Every structure is written in C-alpha cells, then in structure tokens.
Amino acid sequence: MMAAQLYWEKDQGNLELYFAAPMNVMSVLIGMAVGGLVMSSTRAVAILFIATVVFGVSFSISQWTLLIAVFVLTLAALYGFGMMLASLFVMWGREAFHLTQLMTEPVYFVSGLNFPVGRLGFIGALAIALIPLAVGLDAMRQLAFVSTGPTGTPEPWVEALILVAMTIVFIGLARWLLHSMEERARREGRLTVRWR
C-alpha cells in the first residue's frame, strides 16, 4: 500500500507538487509511513483488545521489549520495502498496480498471515529471507503465544536482526531508486517508462 500511494498521488495530480517542493520525496514518504505506523498501531491495539475480551485469546508474553521492538522493526522494514517499490509504481503506472493486485494474496499466504510460516518448509524459509511480513509475524507469534514445540524458524532475536538488516537494505535501496526517479524526471521531463 505504501508503494501504491505515489501512484494514487500521481493520478490525483499531487505528485508534481511533491517534486516541486523544496525537499526530498523520501521525506514525503516517511511522513506517510509515520501516519501509517500510527494507524497500524491503533488497529493492532484494537485487534488485541477484541481478541482478548471477545474471543478469550490468552497470551504468554515474557519479553515485552523484544515483542514491541519486533513490531516496530516489522513496520519499518515494510515501509522501507514500500518506499523502494514506490518508484516502480510511478514509472510503471497501471501495470504495477495490476501486479500488486495479483500478488497480494500469494504474499499473505507465504507470509504466515493465517498459519505459522514454518509449516511451509522451504517456501516458508524463502519467505523469511525475502518478505518482512513473514519474519515479523513469525517472531511475534513466537513471542506472544505458548510454544507448542519447534517451529522450524529462527529464534525471535535472530528474526529481529533479520528485520534490522531488511530495514537498512530496503531504505537504502528506496533512497537510491527515488533519487534515480527524481533525476529521470528532471532530465527527461517525465516520470513514466516509455514502452516501445
């Protein structure tokens, strides 16, 4: 959704204003990410409250600091990934939007959104190596619930380190890609890729 935001801004005619503003486009995206972080945190608190009160879900949390750190790192890595993909949305336009619609459910499936990612074997391990959502959900699942045995995935502190690495890599790539997009816009006077 973070990546699609620039595409929507382009459709509404606001993207030119972002490039004309005397600041980096990444600053605009970070502002959007902070707003999304607040909304995600609000939803998470509401879901936890409803799960506890209405459905009687019991949690077994002994490492609150690590759980909160993993939650924040997961969101940071996801927003870094979204900022990295934002330049592709602007350059590819509708094609990138259709690709997102196509990939949403498969990504949710391999990320362990509905069940532990360790049950997927090699595909789950690949998801943990590439998708921040898979790493974060698995670590939070291990930290919030009583263990029922080996999960087949790394320990939560290892997954926190993976999230730190993903955050650094994704934000670095996002900075480079967005800078390249800005340079192309200034040099060629357009943001989209011209297909031949």
Image (cartoon, helix red, strand yellow):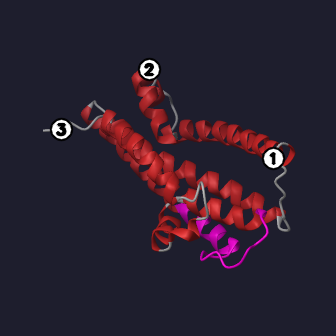
Say if mark 2 contacts mark 1, CB within 8 Å. no
Q: Residues within 10 Å of mark 1 (few under 14, many from 20)?
A: few
Residue 59 at x, y = what percent?
Answer: 83, 60
Which quadrant of the figure has residue 28?
Answer: top right
Residue type at mark 1 is Phe
> What mark, if any, has residue 12 been given in the picture?
2
Q: Which residue is mark 1?
A: 55
Say if mark 1 contacts mark 3, CB within 8 Å. no
Q: Is residue 91 left or right of residue 123?
A: left
Q: Is residue 103 left or right of residue 190?
A: right
> What mark, if any, has residue 30 been given in the picture?
none
**Is residue 146 rendered magenta in the image?**
yes
Using the numbered discs, state the Cα–Cα distance from disc 3 to disc 2 in whole angstroms: 23 Å
**Is residue 159 rendered magenta in the image?**
yes
Q: Residue at x 47, y 53 (%)?
A: 107
Q: Nearer the viewer, residue 162 or 44?
A: 44
Which range of residues does the magenta coloring cover?
144-168
The mark that comes first in sequence, 1 or 3, is 1
Q: Is residue 182 visible in this depiction of the protein?
A: no
Which quadrant of the figure has residue 90?
Answer: top left
Q: Residue at x 84, y 48 (%)?
A: 52
Q: Quadrant of the C terminus?
A: top left
Q: Nearer the viewer, mark 2 or mark 1?
A: 1
Using the numbered discs, state the Cα–Cα distance from disc 1 to disc 3 in whole angstroms: 52 Å
Q: Residues within 10 Å of mark 3 (few under 14, many from 20)?
A: few
Residue 99 at x, y = what percent?
Answer: 35, 43
* Residue located farthest toward the front when viewing the structure as drawn: 55
Q: Secondary structure at mark 2?
A: helix
Q: Is residue 72 visible in this depiction of the protein?
A: yes
Q: Secondary structure at mark 1?
A: loop
